Every structure is written in C-alpha cells, then in structure tokens.
Image (cartoon, rainbow, N blue to C red):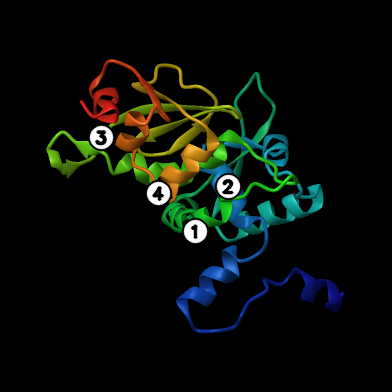
Amino acid sequence: MSRLRHMSRRRSYDQYCATARALDAVGDRWTLLIVRELLAGPRRYTDLHADLPGVSTDVLASRLKDMERDELATRRRLPPPSAAYVYELTERGRGLLPVLTALAEWGAPALEERRPTDAVRAHWFAVPLLPVLDGLPGPGGADGYGQEGVVEVRLDEGAFHIRLGAGDPVYGDGPAESPDARLVLDADTCRALSGGELTVGDGVRDGRIEVSGEGALAKVLRGE
C-alpha cells in the first residue's frame, strides 16, 4: 500500500523556483503537446490520440489525469444526443500559449530537414504561425497592430484556421466556415514564416503565398 501511495504522489523537483514549479506541472513528456491540441478547443480522447502519433493510450490517459489534477484541463460530457466526453483547457491551461509560441520560435530552425520518420499534421503549424499573423498592421496603420478575423491556411498536408483578436480557442483544425482571408502555401514556407526567415509580404511577392478574400484582413495580407 505504501508503494502505491508513493507512486500516486506528484513528482516534483522540490525547488522553490518558478521554473521548477512550472516543470512540475508541464515537464512530463507529451503534456505540452496535449496543450497544443487543446488550444484548438474541446477534443475527445480518441481525437487527441489520433493527433498525437507515438503516445500510448496508458500514457495519454495518465497525462490527462495529471492535467486535471493540476487544473490545466477539465473533462466534461457533451449534451445529448452525444454521449461523448471531451477535454478542454482551463484558463490556467490556456495561459501556456505564450510558452508554446516561444518554444515553437526557438525550435523552428530544427525543422529545416524533415526526417522520413516525422509525422505531420497541418494544424501543428497553427501555434507558431499565430504570432506572425497577430503582428500584422491593424486599423491604426503601420504603427498599429491588432487585426481581427479568421484566416484559413491551406497546406498540402491539410487545412486549419487561426482566429485573430477573437479570444479562445485560438485556432481550429480543418477549413473555416466563413474565413475573412485564405492563405495557400506549402509547409516549408509556413516554417520560414514561423522562424522569421520570411515575411508574409515577401512570400506573397515571391509567389510562395497565395492570398484570397476581399475584406480588410485579406488586403493587409496582400500588402494593399
């Protein structure tokens, strides 16, 4: 019994340090990638498992329980006629978005070479692309920032959409219902944007990014 109690205890670095405390909660393998998936909104367990190739069912279930314990995520049942349960981030869990965007920016140079064993999902580019689109000139012109609207992004690997200035969730998997602008590009161009090697304007001028849409957001993306 004592061994079981020991196994169920939270693992900790036991350091009075903000970084150590944060890693106590999110330092285990897969936790931050689960957060990445849940930033798209509520997800069923089966959907999470499908978009986290390589994670075992036992590990995923364990991480989700840990995230509930640490108040990073909650589990709730969908209303009838659905009988499914979904997981979603709490406010504390959504607060990890800046952490993930910083990690994505730091890790972008490591994506220069795609390994044959690498899995890929189109929506994995959403979080690193979000700060790029959030930095677009807003209604105040060149000195103002804060575009609002939905940008649909289409890659060879699939589509996702990003919501600018609209709160949570910050992105969604798949096409948007009524996007304000649509970008068509390849994964390498998306990586270059995320890593700061390419601007949207340069990508459009070089023919690497195709922009469609007639609203203000699409015009800004085209540099009009």
In this rendering, the label closer to the viewer, 2 or 4: 4
Across and down, in percent, residue 121 comes to 62, 36
Of residues 207 and 99, the one nearer the viewer is: 207
Which residue is drawn at the image coordinates 85% and 76% (left, top)?
A: 3
Going from N to C along the chain, the mark reached first, 3 or 1, is 1
Position above or below: 179 against 160? above
Question: For the residues marked 4 and 1, what is the alpha-carbon distance in whole angstroms?
Answer: 16 Å
Residue at the disc numbered 2 = 74
Going from N to C along the chain, the mark reached first, 1 or 2, is 2
In this rendering, the label closer to the viewer, 3 or 4: 4
Residue at the disc numbered 1 = 103
Question: For the residues marked 1 and 2, what is the alpha-carbon distance in whole angstroms?
Answer: 24 Å
Question: For the residues marked 2 and 3, what is the alpha-carbon distance in whole angstroms?
Answer: 31 Å
Identify residue type, mark 4. Answer: Glu
Mark 1 element type: helix
Assess disc 4: are there few (<14), some (14-19) or many (≥20) residues with their C-alpha within 10 Å of its C-alpha: few
Residue at the disc numbered 4 = 197
Which residue is drawn at the image coordinates 28% and 26% (left, top)?
A: 222
Q: Which picture quadrant has residue 13?
A: bottom right
Residue 135 lies left or right of residue 24; in this view the side is left
Mark 4 element type: loop
